[in-house]
Amino acid sequence: MTDVVFIGPSLPADEVGRLLPDAVVLPPVAHGDLLRLDVGPGDRVLVIDGFFLQHPPVRHREILDLLDRGVTVAGAASMGALRAAELWPFGMRGVGEVFRLYRDGVVTGDDEVAVVHGPAEEGHRGLSEPLVNIRVALRRAVVAGVLSDAEAALLLETGRDLPFRRRSYRALAHTAPPGAAATVDRFLTWHRRNPWDAKSADARTLLSMAARDAPELCPAHAADQPIDNLHTRFLDSWRARFAGASVGGHRVSDRDAAAVLMLTHPEAPTWHRRAVLAGLVGADLTDPTVEERAHEVARRRGLTHPTPTGSDWLTEGERALDEREGVLRVLVRAFGTTPYRSLALWMVAAPLRTPAMLAAARQVAATAASLNETLVPRTTGLRRPGGRLHFRTEVVDECFAGLWGCAPDGVEAAAWDRGFVDLAAFRYAAEPLVAYVKAFGAPRLPAVAQRALEETLAGSAARVG
């Protein structure tokens, strides 16, 4: 069993190690971090802190994906409490006072757990006080007889009126109404003698429960609400972007690997065509009648070559193709292309997604990334936002026209046949590989797909004969 803990200003990382030895301790969670994890049934992901301003916050669907895969996900104190209060009906486990305040609707504002904190090098040290901590301290003061309910409510509103970056006990004293000076002084004097950090306390509770394998921290089960409609285009896109593997010191996403295979494997157009047509007619990829069946379906639906719509997917020279080939090309391009942001491994035909092929593609992507890093000081190009090396569009087109054996003005049609919806999608996927192709030529990807294609065609010929 693996325990993964996302922690930041709520608790020092070394204290996590004392409370839950052998846990994998990571910085505050952000969008995509859960999709990068190599976890499965029996593992536990404990979310305490998370980013929401510097980086996009962790999405609910990312957590639901882990729950659906049998991973125990629990939250407390900060972002973990907030997400647990929203997802506890589906099996995310919530722990602690902050979680209960959100779950029960006592607290509704995300800002109550927000804090300003230092960088990772300083352990994400908190530089402001979360309003939820002030709220809990005021309530404890009421229970202790130090404040009345009305006095506590007044001080809570004073804290709420402050931007989350400015919230602190000192700021509370400076901004309270003049008539409340004695009340603030009484509260702060008591609080200094009886300090209490609700978020830290909840974080410790969660880690202690995990250390003793508390039964409350269990995976989602039949008593929880079912998770419906989980797999959407958004989740597929996020997984393609964030899931992957580390190769040679570079993080290679599934999308990076897919781009290498679609752009550089010599058999990619052939397999892509067969996969798209097989999907349209509900046939197996190796069915020898796929193209005939697809053509017949198109004919019954009134798609003949050329058509006003179909001609958009054919170049000027291709409009002279025979009717059958023209229709098939339109079908493949109309139904089998995607923008770059939707590029995912599932779009790569199955024969090109073998473990050996994926490993080789990831190695190519990592080598290309290393080469790009060495070229930056010497290139006249610029880096795009996010560190991507930028080449002029004509350089990208000419590079891949040479690789694919077509003229530069035929690149768009060749990109369609590899699954890219337009030149912009192709160029964005191809840019990181330009220096690699110029330096080394075509990648030496395994020939598994070629052998499989030969076997498939041989089997098809035998059945037809």
Image (spheres, helix red, strand yellow):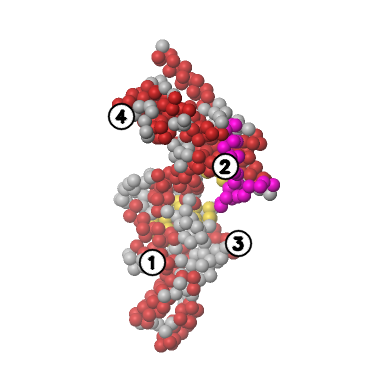
| Span highlighted in magenta in the image | 378-403
At x 51% / y 60%, what residue is drawn?
Answer: 54
Amino acid type, residue under disc 1 in the picture: Gly
- 270 shown above or below 98: above
For marks 3 and 2, give the one nearer the viewer: 2
Q: Nearer the viewer, residue 44 or 20?
A: 44
Amino acid type, residue under disc 2 in the picture: Thr
Q: Are marks 4 and 1 in contact (CB under 8 Å)?
A: no
**Residue 121: which disc?**
3
Label 3, label 2: how many angstroms apart (C-alpha)? 40 Å
Residue 275 visible in the picture = no
At x 45% / y 55%, what residue is drawn?
Answer: 58
Q: Quadrant of residue 109?
A: bottom left
Residue 179 visible in the picture = yes
The residue under label 4 is: 301
Amino acid type, residue under disc 4 in the picture: Arg
For marks 2 and 1, give the one nearer the viewer: 2
Label 2, secondary structure: give it.
Answer: helix
Q: Earlier in the sequence, mark 2 or mark 1?
A: 1
User: Measured from the top left, where is residue 406 in percent x and y?
Assistant: 56, 29
* Residue 236 part of the magenta segment: no
For marks 4 and 1, give the one nearer the viewer: 4
Q: Residues within 10 Å of mark 2 (few under 14, many from 20)?
A: some
Label 1, secondary structure: give it.
Answer: loop
Q: Are marks 4 and 3 in contact (CB under 8 Å)?
A: no
At x 65% / y 34%, what residue is drawn?
Answer: 440
The residue under label 1 is: 109
